[in-house]
Amino acid sequence: FDYLKKRESLPNLFKKEKQLEDKVISKKKFIIDYDSNSQLNINGINGIIMAMDIFVLFCYSIREVYKKDYPKKIYGLGFEQSKRILSKFQNKKLNRKYLAEDFLNNLSLTGYGVFNIINFDLKQNKFLIKIEDNSYALQYKKLFGLTKNTQDLFLAGMIAGAFNQMYN
């Protein structure tokens, strides 16, 4: 897995707590299994595995339907998805910096790209994240060519939703 190698090379930006009573998500691998109803579970969360070109075409189709409202709709989907996932950990006493780092590392592991936190300002709740090798952007470029506008609004929404859940 190239993303495992890339992820392992990322600098540890935060001091991790010596012991966490609850592991949030595996730092080394994903646990993929099936529940009693034959539903796919990825680290205990019901999910699917989908080729990126299918996801890009899905988002493109949504854009064609919603036109001007598309950015708000697709961003909102990503935002709500992350909030729902991270709400499971809301009552647990976890280091929020560790949770943010772990969330981004696991996005990297799933193929969304390599994430580097450039600025992490807890006082003003401002975070600047650089994303390299974003698989959505690369696939969008292959299918539709270059564009002047940001295309991966779903990922932007996911990151915003996660940080909103962690820090508000």
Image (cartoon, rainbow, N blue to C red):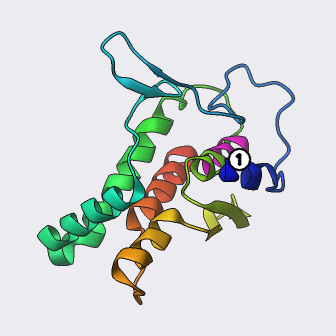
| Residue 151 visible in the displayed image | no
Residue 141 % position (x, y): 43, 78
Residue 55 x %, y %: 34, 57
The boundaries of the magenta stretch are 98-104
Whether residue 76 is visible: yes
Specify few, some or many for label 1: CA neighbours under 10 Å numbering under 14, 14-19, or 20 or more.
some
Is residue 81 covered in magenta? no
Q: Is the magenta stretch mostly helix, strand or loop?
A: helix
| SS for callout 1 | helix
Residue drawn at x 39%, y 67% as measured from the top left = 153
Task: Residue lying at the far left in this picture: please name it.
Answer: 65
Q: Quadrant of residue 15?
A: top right
Residue 73's x, y, as percent? 25, 62
Describe residue 129's horizontal placement relative to residue 163 as left or right. Answer: right
150 is higher (above) or lower (below) than 156 = below
Q: In this view, does 153 lie above or below 48?
A: below
The answer to whether residue 3 is left or right of residue 149 is right
Q: What residue type is labelled 1?
A: Leu
Quarter of the image holding residue 53? bottom left
Q: Residue drawn 53% across and 28% down?
A: 43
**Which residue position is annotated with label 1?**
4
Q: Which residue lies furthest to the bottom in this view?
A: 148
Looking at the image, which residue is at 38% across and 34% down?
47
Q: Along the line of sight, which residue is nearer the eye, 49 or 78?
A: 49
Q: Nearer the viewer, residue 160 or 123?
A: 160
- Classify residue 150 by image quadrant: bottom left
Point 28% across, 64% down: residue: 57
Magenta segment: does it hold 101? yes
From the viewer's perspective, is residue 30 above or below residue 120? above
Give how far across and how far down residue 63 sits, in percent: 21, 70
Compared across the picture, whether 115 is left or right of 80 comes to right
